[in-house]
Image (tube, grey):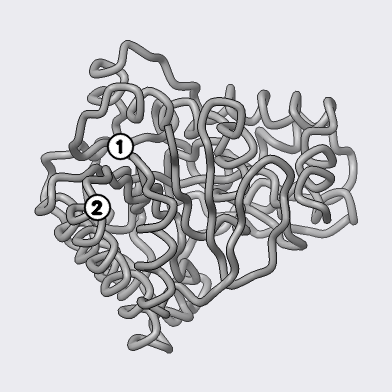
Amino acid sequence: MKVYITGIAGMLGSNIAYLLKDKYEICGVDIMPFNAKGIKCEQFNLLDYTSLVKSIHEFSPQYLIHTAAMVDVDLCEEKKEEAYNINTKLTEVLSRLCLEESCKMIYISTDAVFDGRNNRLYIEKDKTMPVNYYGETKLLGEKSVLKNGHTVIRTNIYGYNIQDKNSFGEWIYKSLESGRTLNMFTDIYFSPILVNDLAEVLVCIISSYKSGLFHVCATGAVSKYEFGVYLKEIFEINKGKICAVKSDSFHFKAIRPENMGMSNKKVCKEYGITLRTAKESIEYFYELYKNNYHLILKKWGGL
């Protein structure tokens, strides 16, 4: 089976490609240069629709995983036209193109489509009401994908970067190791999933050839503060410090929803799987670190 991945040089795209390369024939595209072993990589701007159509048509995939996105929440608020073009318009173009090419599409969306006012975990049927422009653009993308019979995955990810960037988890352990003091929110909750676990769910979805809307996330929810404390404990970091703070003590350009916790019961029931809790996920994150997964990933990508 052939799988096409947008944003293949990013954290999610590169990890998916690395973890699925032995199962599928993979072609990826990114504006960044990327020359990983065992997969086909193309470099062009995804908003260059002529190149995009040509690339997908020539590779002729059975599945397309759309990971490319503008994810900086504050930047989306500042550069709304750019955010719309990348998060909404590009997604709409891909969903129609996949329909024409008889290719199933999996769109990676976000927990930011909710307003964060629920006092329980969000389920797929809950009303969407984003409080920032990032969430709005991703939600509009969702509607196009579902309308054309494809799959939407709402998630909140972290993992090891192949580029010189830091995911939320990497930022915490690197900051603590350097002796920094981190202010982390006690009133913002989420259900973070390691990209490695997300990749396993993608295999289930691809194998089933089913479509729909799924929350693919950790089991339960934790505060950002709890996540940091767990990571410091599990990685056995004696340096640095984590301080508990409220989110209203910071002034962001974009509003942040307070409760982003989601329920993964639907996807677990659909595919007969169990997903880790946030704490179990961090334990796996540490296990990967000890086994040099982050270094192996970079070497594979030629970085």
Of the two numbered discs 2 and 1 in the rendering, the one whose residue sits closer to the viewer: 2
Of residues 144 and 100, the one drawn nearer to the viewer in this rendering? 100
Residue visible at 67% across and 24% down in the picture = 283
Q: Is residue 3 left or right of residue 159?
A: left
Above/below status of 131 relative to 85: above
Residue visible at 69% across and 60% down in the picture = 34
Q: Residue furthest top?
A: 272
Give percent across and percent down for residue 104: 26, 43
Three-letter amino acid code of the residue under disc 2: Glu
Secondary structure of the residue carrying numbered label 1: strand
- Identify the residue under disc 1: 215
Q: Which mark is residue 191?
A: none
Of residues 15 and 239, the one drawn nearer to the viewer in this rendering? 15
Give percent across and percent down for residue 272: 32, 11
Q: Is residue 274 left or right of residue 174?
A: left
Of residues 91 and 50, the one drawn nearer to the viewer in this rendering? 50
Above/below status of 191 relative to 131: above
Q: Local crowd at mark 2 within 10 Å, few (<14), some, or many (≥20)?
A: some
The C terminus appears in which quarter of the rendering?
Answer: bottom right
Give percent across and percent down for residue 52: 40, 69
Residue visible at 66% across and 46% down in the picture = 169
Dot 2 or dot 1, earlier in sequence: 2
Q: Local crowd at mark 1 within 10 Å, few (<14), some, or many (≥20)?
A: many
- Identify the residue under disc 2: 101
Give percent across and percent down for residue 249: 51, 71
User: Residue 183 appears in which quarter of the rendering?
Assistant: bottom right
The CA span between labels 2 and 1 is 26 Å
User: Residue 22 appears in which quarter of the rendering?
Assistant: top right
